[in-house]
Amino acid sequence: MAGVSTTTVSRVLNGNRDVSPTTREAVLTAVDVCGFERPVRFRRERAQLIGLVVPDLQNPVFSATSEVLAGLLNGHGLVPVLCTRTADGVSESHYVDMLLEQNVGGIVFVGASYADVGEAQGRALRQRGIPVVLVNPADENAGVAQVSVDDAGAAEQALTHLAALGHERIGMIVGPSGHVPSVRKIAGYAAFNARRGVPAKDWRALVAHALFSMEGGATALAQLLPRGVTAVVCASDALALGAIRGARRRGLDVPAELSVVGFDDSLFMVATDPPLTTARQPVAAMASAAVQFLTEQIRTGVAGSTEVLFDTELIVRGSTARPPARG
């Protein structure tokens, strides 16, 4: 893997100084990638491995973000290690323990809950000064470098589009209570309704919480339809597709009888039936900012604490239209 002879590997691992820094680093990186333990003399050195901790790869935006991050990290001579929760119980805390054992050079959490890492693991990351960057984190994290979407602005953008079409009863389907991006979208929903003079007790009834899945979207829509909504803004494309499926099960046409807006602009949303109107996350720009934060921390040894917000772009397609005429 290192592209050198076994003799050269032996020289590096035995601390022989007659080896170039480039060759030495190649051998140590190969040791890390293969999962071998570094000799004691090298354990204090920070490895070139970077953990990418992702809740799952079924969400297309997580996999897209991870792919872009991996390419950017490789360009900096860093080796990405993908860590995603598995059905057999391997969690974020397990991965962090494994990464700590490898003396990892940094960790990027993508859409994950930093709190789920565990108290002991979080303390170890801070004590060892390991660079950490959060991308669209699921919870509040003061004192950590973060790259996020302006969820409140994205919600207001979608709501303004639907209102311009003539919709008045607009519902919102978001993730579980406490999920920070969802909380921020609700804040945008609150600001939008406040400007229109809608009392909080009225618009709160049009917010439904759900798991981030198509089933969650369909279930949440069933709660909102009896409340007279003619449009829904969803916190993910999966929720939006579930809402469309739920509407069709009830004999409703999308968009003639119900308009639906998603979030993320995942791959293939242009090819759904109907093509989905959705808020596009600037994945490449966000990944670039995350890697910049990470490499700066690696270079300076100073932990980051800034959060950068990125605007979304509303991509209008065929899932939104004027509301049905009142009969």
Image (tube, rainbow, N blue to C red):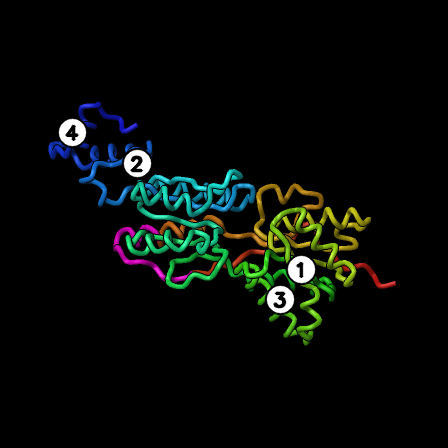
State yes or no: discs 4 and 1 in contact (Cβ < 8 Å): no
Q: Amino acid at mark 4?
A: Arg
Q: Residues within 10 Å of mark 4 (few under 14, many from 20)?
A: some
Q: Position of residue 36 (x, y in %)?
A: 29, 33
Dot 4 falls on a residue whose secondary structure is: helix
Q: Residues within 10 Å of mark 3 (few under 14, many from 20)?
A: many
Label for residue 208?
1
Mark 1 vs mark 2: which is more N-terminal? Answer: 2
Q: Residue at x 74, y 49 (%)?
A: 246
Q: Amino acid at mark 3?
A: Tyr
Residue ID for mark 2: 32
Q: Is residue 76 left or right of residue 167?
A: left
Q: Residues within 10 Å of mark 1 (few under 14, many from 20)?
A: many
Q: Which residues are magenta?
A: 294-307
Mark 3 vs mark 1: which is more N-terminal? Answer: 3
Q: CA distance from mark 4 to mark 3?
A: 63 Å
Label for residue 11?
4
Q: Can residue 254 be seen in the rendering of this structure?
A: yes
The correct choice, above or below, for 187 with respect to 120 in the image is below
Mark 4 vs mark 3: which is more N-terminal? Answer: 4
Q: Amino acid at mark 1?
A: Ala
Q: Amino acid at mark 2?
A: Asp
Residue ID for mark 3: 189
Q: Residue at x 50, y 46 (%)?
A: 55
